[in-house]
Image (tube, rainbow, N blue to C red):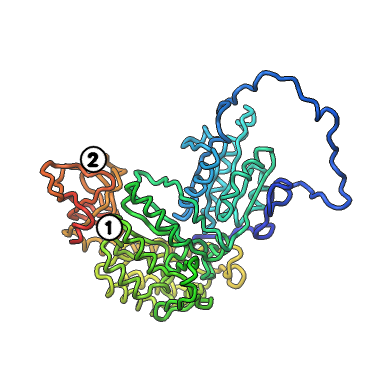
Amino acid sequence: MQGCGRVLRAAGRLGSVAASPGASRGASCGPGERPGGRGAALPAGPDLRHFLRAPPGPPPPPGPERGAAAGPGTVYLETYGCQMNVNDTEIAWAILQKNGYTRTKEVDEADVILLVTCSVREKAEQAIWNRLQHLKALKARRQQDRLPLRIGILGCMAERLKEEILHREKLVDIVAGPDAYRDLPRLLAVAESGQQAANVLLSLEETYADILPVQTSAGGTTAFVSIMRGCDNMCSYCIVPFTRGRERSRPIASILQEVKMLSDQGVKEVTLLGQNVNSFRDMSEVQFQSAAAPVLSRGFSTVYKAKPGGLRFAHLLDQVSRIDPEMRIRFTSPHPKDFPDEVLQLIQERHNICKQLHLPAQSGSTRVLEAMRRGYTREAYLELVHHVRDSIPGVRLSSDFIAGFCGETEEDHQQTVSLLREVRYNVGFLFAYSMRQKTRAYHRLQDDVPADVKQRRLQELIAVFREEAARANEAMVGQSQLVLVEGPSKRSASELCGRNDGNIKVIFPDAEIKDAAGCKALVRAQPGDYVLVKVTSASSQTLKGVPLCRTTLACSKA
């Protein structure tokens, strides 16, 4: 989770709340207001006019857009950043929908615009500032037409830059951090009265376990289920612990309920989400609170003491995979330290748990890894990679890398290049380092690698990754891959697109094929179908092939 550059220090303290006076517990005065107190002048009391009933008049005319019987408003949601933000969008929408809001896909039709934001890199934040400039003109037009428009910033950027967002050009009406989505209806009500409102309080308990997100993924074939929030790893470069708070996990029962609901809706692939997903620890059941802490991967350590008790990720993965044998299960993003053998064995044994793991390395240099506080050496990481490949034959690997971290030398960079070549990942996420305020690196280290050097190193890493990924993918040419169809290819209506077990995109012709279930008639594959595809060509990012037959997950593994 990284990118490039430094931003201004945000004013105010973490966890401040701005809203209308007396709005709710934890609220304080809005910007520009002074709280009442001892010696403050009392407001004028009611006079006789307040107790006289006004004569009945004609009913007010319906509003220009919503009509007399409409709810509180129409909302437009826009999502930036990681998949956790997509899930946050679904949670926020579930809360607003329950409170009577309607949703639109057209920004011009909305009277509430909410941007779910990312703070991992400066580039992500700049995208939001640029978007707000576009919305400024829209809001000015609405004011001229007397059609109020409320704009809100949600998520990590709201948590990090609350004061700056509220005061910069006075454009934003509400600010809500990742743990404040339940408060959105109240914040919007405050904003409707003409005041700015904010809630960026971080919680030690909030997981939104009782809220079933409204899934918004296209086609309904795949879905994401958040199982935990926050992170305790405190890597020196990472802002996540400061924008999403400490680790806390959802009760397993609520996760299983959501996955079962998705299965009933026909969803064929679920990805379990968390900032450190495999450190899952459900403490909701008393009888498991004294369980021993799991053993870390060999050669790995943490900055915090081992946490005993709770139901762990292996138990959750086991239970989720039993719900629907025709539903694929993935999870992201894990930390390499939390891969006990029982998790690897479960992945190898269950046909519906994808044989694909994300192992974020961040660097190939032990010296840089120590500065990042990753808790492992290059050698320990490579030992884990070999152990994973021995435990799960044919597993596909993906990773994250940061170019140009504080103090990175050319020799450190070359060690990362050599790690990319040695491991040969199928999928990679590579970024130039971006210094983030509040992080340990911001306070203890120097962002001393010039921007042009960061970019050169990043481009070298990307080139090496693509070269090695192409070789890894070319090894699948001539093989048959089971593909979950997601829909038409973006480049051609005559082709379908899906992903194989290793999460690699596969494109093949939309043609009539046999059905392995024994149906004599030829069929055309639909989104949500499993299709066996023979790979004919490969690049660093995509496989192409010809469809052989429609099948099922269980049959293909048999």
Q: Is 223 left or right of 128, judged from the image as shown?
A: left
Q: Quick one: 359 or 266, which is closer to the camera?
A: 266
Q: Nearer the viewer, mark 1 or mark 2?
A: 1
Type of the residue with mark 1? Pro
Q: CA distance from mark 1 to mark 2?
A: 30 Å
SS for tag 1? loop
Q: Is 247 left or right of 33, judged from the image as shown?
A: left
**Which residue has dot 2 on it?**
494
In this rendering, the answer to whether 102 lies above or below 341 is: above
Q: Where does residue 31 sit, x and y in percent of width and height? A: 73, 47
Figure quadrant of the C terminus: bottom left
Would you say residue 1 is visible in this rendering?
A: no
Q: Is 373 left or right of 26, judged from the image as shown?
A: left
Q: Where does residue 294 sit, x and y in percent of width and height? A: 43, 76
Query: Crowding at label 2, few (<14), some or many (≥20) Cα neighbours within 10 Å?
Result: few
Q: How many marks?
A: 2
